[in-house]
Amino acid sequence: MTTSWVIGADTSDYSSSVLPYGVALVGPSAEPHVVTRIGDSMLDLHTLTESGPVGSDFTDVLAAGSLNALLASGRPTWTRLRAALTSWVTDPAHRPQVEEHLSPVAGATLTLPFEVADYVDFYSSEQHAKNVGQIFRPDSPSLPDNWKHLPIGYHGRSGTVVASGTPIVRPTGQRKPRNATEPTFGPSQRLDIEAEVGFVVGTPSQLGTQVPAGALTDHVFGTVLVNDWSARDLQAWEYVPLGPFLGKSFATSIAAWVIPLDALTEARRPLPVQDPAVFDYLRDDDPWCLDLRLSVDLNGTVVSEPPFATQYWSPGQQLAHLTVNGASLRTGDLFASGTVTGPQRHQRGSFLELSWGGREPFTLDDGSQRTFLEDGDTVTISGWAPGPAGRRIGLGAVTGTVVGGP
Ligand code: CA
């Protein structure tokens, strides 16, 4: 464990053990610069490495206005840069060159950290899948037949993956209430959230090849918190037989900070036992998941604390499954876990589950009640993970406020 010369950083959720990457809009022309965070400060890696002499060998991967060049550079460069970053914020010898590139993170405008290539969303929490089954199909087995054989997923809409803070316009569409005879059209009346963890692909794969379940760290750069906004009424009417479409594609928010997998080494946990046994392509000699502790805040009330460690399928298995047919990975691909829900009531990662299909309203600290989102509601998903020597690894935050539709 290293200590930083940046005041307050060592006891922060953003100590030198984290060093996340983001993109800030800098100056009057709002130029996008690659940045990291240390304590309550943001370090401008673009100006630091361009001005030299510190980090001048990283100028190429840090000069772009997004993280894509860094993502494409591959694990050896990711490792070298992380070691260099650690040295810049911990070795007092670097302080004179580095300090002038620090600024308060509180005043920064952060934007979408990378250009999202393809976006895939999984459904890997057993408790979430069971809850949804019980809410919608109370007379059937709660898990679909295929659920424990493959990580279920679908391809989402990467063009509407938006930066944290982007207002979420209530979507309009068709819906057909359960007892209605005809569909109706209008703004969604059952707008929901899904608290998820996303994985950001750096190193691509060749078309026609499979990525093994144990090769996650070869391809995946890091994690990013995700809110998969969902219009349950639109979704329920449209999803048979081809799956999620307009009930999901209007917006998916991601956090401003991408957390390197290298910051989450201490958060690795053995994957829970899988029964029945999985096909060989989903096997990994050392399967692991991550102990990430999420928190869902609605208008200042923490309504849920979903534990990511309870996921049934590992991110390595998700990656293996999404490439088993030979589909290739691209730099900037994002795959999300699906709603994270634990076994307890206060660990449910969607309002659908918290309100049990809208039948059991839950109460906020101000006394108001919710089943689904109202206009003006602000949802923030944040989280942390165990780090070295009792430190917490901050996972960033993804926030959004619902505004009325057209
Ligand atoms: Ca989802």
Image (spheres, helix red, strand yellow):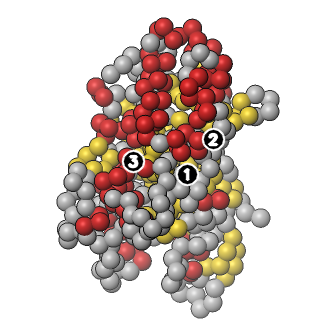
Label 1 to label 2: alpha-carbon separation = 10 Å
Picture quadrant of residue 97: top right
Q: In the figure, is residue 300 to the left or right of 75?
A: right
For residue 227, above or below residue 73: below
- The residue that label 1 is drawn on is 332
Considering every residue shown, the one lying at the far right of the view is: 28
Which of the two residues, 185 or 246, is positioned nearer the viewer here? 246
Label 1 to label 3: alpha-carbon separation = 14 Å
Q: In the figure, is residue 385 to the left or right of 397?
A: left
Question: Is residue 98 among what the camera can see?
Answer: yes
Picture quadrant of residue 263: top left
- Tell me where residue 140 appears, x and y as whole percent: 32, 83
- Tell me where residue 216 appears, x and y as whole percent: 37, 51
Q: Are marks 1 and 2 in contact (CB under 8 Å)?
A: no
Q: Which label is found at residue 218? A: 3
User: Where is the C terminus found, in terms of image quarters?
Assistant: bottom right
Picture quadrant of residue 3: top left
For residue 77, above or below residue 104: below
Q: Which label is found at residue 387? A: none
- The residue that label 2 is drawn on is 66
